Image (spheres, grey):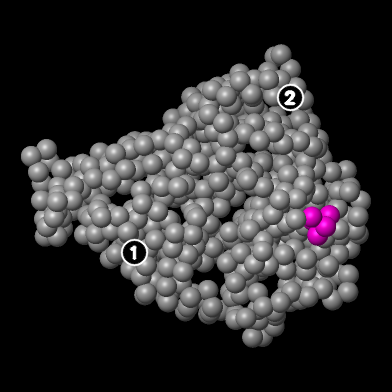
Amino acid sequence: MTARTVRVRGAVAATLATALTTGLAACSNPSGSTAADTAVVGIATEPESLSPLLGYGKDGNSKIFDGLLTHDADMKLKPALAEALPEVSADGRTYTYKLRQGVTFSDGEPFSAKDVEFTYRTILDPKTNNASKTELDAVESVTAQGADRVVFTLKYPYAPFAERTVLPIAPEHLAGRQDVNSGEFTTKPVGTGPYVLTGWSKGEKLSFKANPAYWGGEPAVKKFTMAVVKDDDVRATRLRSGELDAAILPPNLARTFAKDTTRRTFAAKTFDYRDVTLPTHHPVTGDTAVRQALDIAVDRQAMVDKLLEDAGKAAYGPVPTDSGWFTAGTERPYDLERAKQLLDEAGWKAGDDGIRAKDGVRASFPLWYTSGDKIRQDHALAFASDARKAGIEVKTEAGTWEVIEPRMKTDAVLAGGGSPADPDFDQYQLLTSSLAGDGFNNMAQYANPAVDQALLDARRSGDQAVRKAAYDTVQRELAKNPGYVFLTHIDHLYVVNDKWDGLSTQVEPHDHGLGSGPWWNVENWKPKQK
């Protein structure tokens, strides 16, 4: 997300450049071309842990692991470690999964229902440091029935529960014998997935090899490396030099490869948004009138046109305007004069320098963005420029997440998020007051009783109409009382060497690192026939 779910950790760009020049040399020959059974891709972020017990791969596509279910290219659920989709009881509270037979972990040990029970129970254990455990709030119990059947009993009907079972399954025989929060499994995992981790140089790269015993068949791409290159420009340079076979790039850099006949550009539609957190405990951003004014003082369409070069759309909340979950009528058009009027009426008067003040408080606050991320930098600068026209001073600051995280409760952050699987997956953590200030959850410390109730109604109902009405309430409340200024939804652009068949993209979440991109199905790639 931001880093609400995947926190960026790495060295500065110069260090990365040096490390990658050395570290990737083994993956490329001097001409810059790589073997057809080897792929090196450039990503912008890396996880803190590779343990699903701590949240890794919770949305699927982890490569090392499998869930009970997975998604196809159209984001529809299909069986993975389960033989079929679950049997669901009439009251919506019991989900029964029959497991695939003959599956082994990459160390040769058999997979069974006990591993599923262990995984979910461990995540729900209060002692486990998994920031996403609230996503499994509906689970009352999980029980292995023999080796090949697992039954989940829910506290209440939770419509998107099957989507939660893409969560990777960890082996009890290894992870169960270690400290869940700090054991070796967090960096040297073993799973049932198509790839086996062979090395992880933090801040530099993750290396994998094909799992010859994979139940879905051994992948044709035998060696797969994810190079962690936080800086956009460095990532483009490494791609151009041949050290990378593929990379995610912002629009302005992806465009520089448009005439390169040896590469293809993939544009993935997403739920990925960029927003500005407006901490409600700050003397400036805590004023509802200031938040309302900023919400209409930003020219979202100009950001789409100029910053994204049309690779995205204006955002008015976490739900994209072309989604069936979007509430028509909650769009907020750019209206600078109305923004000024709101501030005037609330007592924020312009000073000699054009910056407003109220009761001795200057309308000024810092806005942090992650260094090396050009899209966030551009959005932060554009937001600050628009805010100044309304008489609000926004001072942009760049830093790593290590620098930003301690300041999140008081300072604004150019953040992001988004999940296409279900509205609950993003909105609950983003907006419920019960998670206010809890790490990367509800960073604005937003508190709105109507929103809290609607979020609960939506997640606890199996009725689609009830859920839609609840999320309509959430979006209308955000329009009236914003805790965030949503700016754009961003298409993800990937440039890839044109030497494989089978590449495609899915509708993607905010997390565009290990689990997304054209390599979401790298295990199915085949070398092009010459």
Give the magenta-colored segment's residue range: 174-178
Residue 282: quarter of image: bottom left
User: Disc 2 marks which amino acid?
Assistant: Cys
Ranked by sequence position, the earlier of labels 2 and 1 is: 2
Considering the numbered disc 1 on the image, is that residue within a helix, a strand or a loop? helix
> Which of the 4 image quadrants contains residue 82?
bottom right
Residue toward you, 329 or 337: 337
Instruction: Assess whether residue 484 is covered by the magenta stretch.
Output: no
Residue underneath mark 2 = 27
Residue at position x 38%, y 57% in the image: 444
Q: What's the residue at 35%, 55% (across, down)?
A: 279
Picture quarter with the C terminus: top right
Determine whether the residue tagged by mark 2 lies in a helix, strand or loop.
helix
Characterize the magenta stretch by its predominant secondary structure.
Answer: loop
Percent across and percent down for residue 229 are: 58, 31
Q: Is residue 488 left or right of residue 501?
A: left
